[in-house]
Amino acid sequence: MRHLTLEHRFVRNAPRVLEPGVLYISMEYATAVHSCCCGCGDRVVTPFTPTDWRMTFDGESVTLNPSVGNWNQACRSHYVIDKNRVIEYGPWSDARVEIEKRRDKQAKAEYYGCTPGLARHDSLSTAPAGYTAQTSGLWSRFQGWFSK
């Protein structure tokens, strides 16, 4: 990992150009954005929803949970942000990524009342989320955030 710590900044809107090593947090849009901690420069968006990420602020530092898995980016980096520290996790196989995508889809379907047709046995018991399927509500919030 290129960045081993992140500075958090509470903002209304994320800047178009992200400063490396900074975690931008918008409570208004319930989203955090940062430049990938591996150093590749890709924009990483982590929405705060019941089925995606949770952010904890203890007055001094920020924790995002679960882990950040950049499966759709070339770097495929995987890490946790815990009290502003970046902790590198090992890479996932393609099979593990697919299992996590199914688990994520199932969690969203259950929470939002849809029927995806996936069985519960496809999930990993405590797998960190690594894939984010966008809902129209989230997408609208992101568009609003970046267009300001």
Image: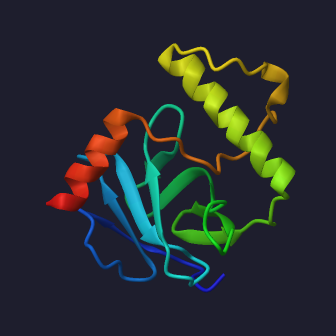
Tell me what residue is drawn at x 81 percent, y 59 percent: 92
Q: Nearer the viewer, residue 140 or 7?
A: 140
Tell me what residue is drawn at x 56 percent, y 27 percent: 108
The N terminus - image quarter: bottom right
Q: Residue 3, located in which quarter of the rendered image?
A: bottom right
* Horizontal relation, residue 69 to residue 121: left or right: left
Please state the horizontal and vertical placement of residue 130, each as a whole percent of the image. Answer: 65, 51
Q: Is residue 131 visible?
A: yes
The C terminus - image quarter: bottom left
Give the residue furthest to the front: 117
Tell me what residue is drawn at x 57 percent, y 22 percent: 109
Q: Residue 122, located in which quarter of the rendered image?
A: top right
Q: Is residue 12 visible?
A: no
Q: Nearer the viewer, residue 56 or 128?
A: 128
Up the image or down, 125 lies above or below 47; here it is above
Up the image or down, 66 lies above or below 43; here it is above
Please state the horizontal and vertical placement of residue 19, each as a whole percent of the image. Answer: 36, 82
Q: Residue 5, located in which quarter of the rendered image?
A: bottom right
Q: Nearer the viewer, residue 135 or 30?
A: 135
Please state the horizontal and vertical placement of residue 88, each as a whole percent of the image. Answer: 71, 71
* Horizontal relation, residue 9 to residue 127: left or right: left
